[in-house]
Image: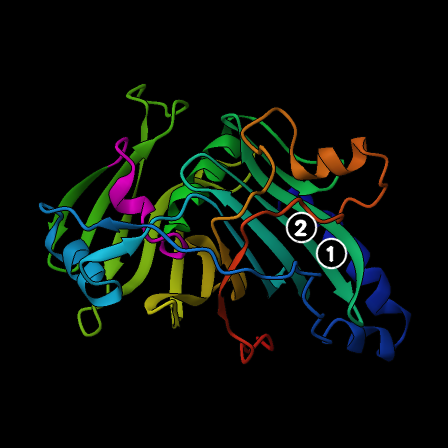
Amino acid sequence: MNRFGKVAIGVAGGFAALTGIGWIGLHVPPANLDMPHDAHPVLDMVAVPNGLPAPVQRYYDVAFGERVPRIDSMVVYGRARANFGIWLPLRYRLSHRPGHTFERYMEITWFGLPILKAVDRYVNGAGATGPVGNEATGPAIDQGANMILWAEAPLMPSLWISDERIRWEAIDDEAARLHFPFSGRENGDGTDELIVHFDPATGLVDHITAQRYRDAESGKVPWRVDFLSWQTVHGVQVPARVAVAWADQGEPWSYWDFEYLFWNVDVWNVDGAETATDRNSASGAGDRDAPLAWNALVQVGVNTTADTSR
């Protein structure tokens, strides 16, 4: 179990052990984190290129058509449940500069109130994961965090066709391999890879598989993300819910609902040395959940019926 999981189970177990009411508190879905007000700038479009593997081409035809919104940045708000020995509710804010950096700020909650704050991030080629102020780092964490940049691309539809550093490789009519940049890979060629499996009935992404480090102590483990449901946002299809699993656990360890999506927003300069949580701390705000700065905000999708009970 990683550092976040060990701390989470300790804190949540302490609350749950207090009384039966304490246990009930771990089954109360939290409200979403505070969100900014929305605006509606025009989204630029990018043409779908020729020469993609057949299932990738079909996915873009079905989900987007001939042109795809160009996504330069993205923020998602939502809720999830994660199994760290017991199922825990959490809420999160996910920020991406597609293909370069991301940060997922999370709060595990009890009766809807935060009891543990944590972060996953990948900034300047370095990953970090764990409780805020006690994150795990290192080469294994870097590999796993970099993979998240590319596995979450269905939320940012232009990434898989507009980034010149990636390469698609055909496998069969239902799968294709994505090669993407990662300087820390053992073979030294500066890339890593994941396999995207497509639903033969719908053409949408069905699941993603890869070899990924779970933590700094263990070796790579087969990792899988299942796309359980989809939603229409600005006339295109993006994921609404995913399940994440490690092969040696036999079942998903977490379910994530993407409830509010914002495209092409100013999320500060997350390519710089400091991250959102660092900026909040340095500003003297004291609250690491202080909101980011936003400009040209567009709310592109809302899923208010997402089931967070699992």
The residue located at (37%, 25%) in the rendering is 185
Q: Identify whether 8 is placed above or below 132.
A: below
Region of the chain picked out in magenta, as a range: 154-166
Above or below: residue 255 compared with residue 263: below
Magenta span contains residue 11? no
Residue lying at 25% horizontally and 62% vertically, measured from the top left? 64
Is there CB contact under 8 Å for labels 2 and 1? yes
The answer to whether 253 appears left or right of 156 in the picture is right
Considering depth in this image, is 282 or 120 the residue closer to the camera? 282
Residue on which disc 2 sits: 5
Give the residue pinned by disc 1: 9
Residue 220 x, y percent position in the rendering:
43, 38
* Residue at position x 57%, y 75% in the image: 310
Does residue 84 appear anywhere in the picture? no
Q: Position of residue 208 (x, y in %)?
A: 33, 54
Tell me the quarter of the picture where residue 181 sits: top left
- Cα gap from disc 2 to disc 1, whole angstroms: 6 Å
Three-letter amino acid code of the residue under disc 2: Gly
